[in-house]
Amino acid sequence: MNDETKNQLSWFRGVAPYINAYRGNTVIVLVSGELLLQTDEAGMRQTRRLMEDIALLNSLGLKIVCVYGARPQIDERLRQGGIESQIHTDLRVTDVTTLAHLTEAVGRLQTELQARLTQSLSSTPLRNNQVSVAGGNFIIARPIGVVDGVDLEHTGVVRRVDTQSIRALLDLGQIVLLGPLGYSPTGEVFNLASEDVAASVAIALHAEKLVILSEQDGLIDTEGRLVRETSVAEAMQMIGALEASDARSAFRHERRRLLAACRALQKGTRRVHIINGTRDGALIQEIYTRDGIGTMITDQSYETFRAAVIDDAAGILNIIRPLEEQGILVKRDRERLEREIGNFMIVERDGLIIGCAALYFYREYAAAELACVAVDPAYQTGGRGDRLLLHAERKARELGAKQVFVLTTQTAHWFLERGFRPAGLDELPEEKQRLYNFQRRSKVFIKQLA
């Protein structure tokens, strides 16, 4: 077996559990109008590749609602018509004339995307799987009205989503395609923000995920690094920072996306992903791989991850003591735990410690040991162990570690499934080698940090 085949098999084994786990789940995909104008290295429009990936997700059993933006397409249509668009508080004033050009631009884009989706699998081995696409007046809207003395006319917000009709189409295996338009019971048409449409649909359908495709890798911290995972609370802080920034107008799209993400999460959507849609296969990689490629935001308002303090010792002991008795964890008395408390991080839920992990940094080797990973049995669903691992890896990177290692006797497969590889004792820092307990015979696993 050659290396390429081995890599393909390894990749398939890695994604197969995710394909099975997400089959039948509802995912909302938001594609910005700016992204639809991008071209790849070969000069091809991103539209074709994105629609192919969305159709592939549909063929793998996901229920897909694709929401698209059209701001640059609308701007271009207005420019061609010699119409200057009026913007007020970051919203387009949509008069009757503007609305006519706007609906034409959106209608043209709807037709193009629907055609792309329909033919997306025709040149692949899945060509016999017909892709059915549906659109319609599923978004009921109302006018925003007068803001600071300015009538926004046909600019509106989502009032209600026709969930019954959308669910019926999704159950038939169809992809639902929605643009930035809404309709009133009296027959009016409204110009909507695509972010408002996507968040409203995600909330109404109780979607598993809202995936926001943009032209950036995700959320970037103050040091220019990609934020792999964050909470609603942290995202709201970012929104506040953007609003206070002198460059607020330059980040208006990011602000809108973050507001939509937080709104969806606070009202029931489990996860929001913000990824760079210009990267080939980004959508598939984000959904079907453990680490993803962009930023994942979750609502952990009632759960916090933080560094442990001395007062947390009793709560940590309550979690790790049963695992020590089973021989899964190395025994630690209270004195040792209090001495090493600065190495611990915890998961706290409404004041109750429900998870912990410890990180020991070996600066000379640019390596960190992950130890004492434990979650209260009552809270072992919901991916808390995975989030503890992500927080530990983030902390290790901040310390300067290039790799993380663990020693375990009974949880080898859990670490193997999360990117660790078997390693020899000689790959550990010398200090750790000297302290190795040959009676316990723990297995060594190492993970390289990107």
Image: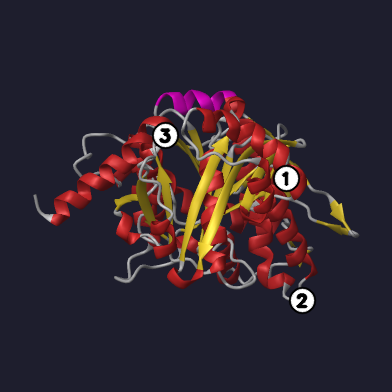
The label nearer to you, 3 versus 1, is 3
In the image, what residue occupies the spot 59% across and 71% down? 79
Q: Mark 3 points at which residue?
A: 62
Q: In what element is the residue under mark 1?
A: strand
Q: Earlier in the sequence, mark 3 or mark 2?
A: 3
Using the image as rendered, state which of residue 85 and residue 81 is in the foreground.
85
- Residue 309 location, x and y as percent? 74, 50
Is residue 170 on the magenta stretch? yes
Q: Quadrant of residue 351?
A: top right
**Which stretch did the figure color magenta?**
164-172
Q: Mark 1 points at which residue?
A: 157
In the image, what residue occupies the spot 73% across and 66% down? 242
Among all residues in the image, which is located at the extreme left? 1
Is 129 rendered above or below residue 291?
above
Q: Is the residue marked by circle 2 packed among few (<14), some (14-19), or many (20+) residues within 10 Å?
A: few
Specify whether residue 230 is in view: yes
In the image, what residue occupies the spot 70% across and 36% down? 315
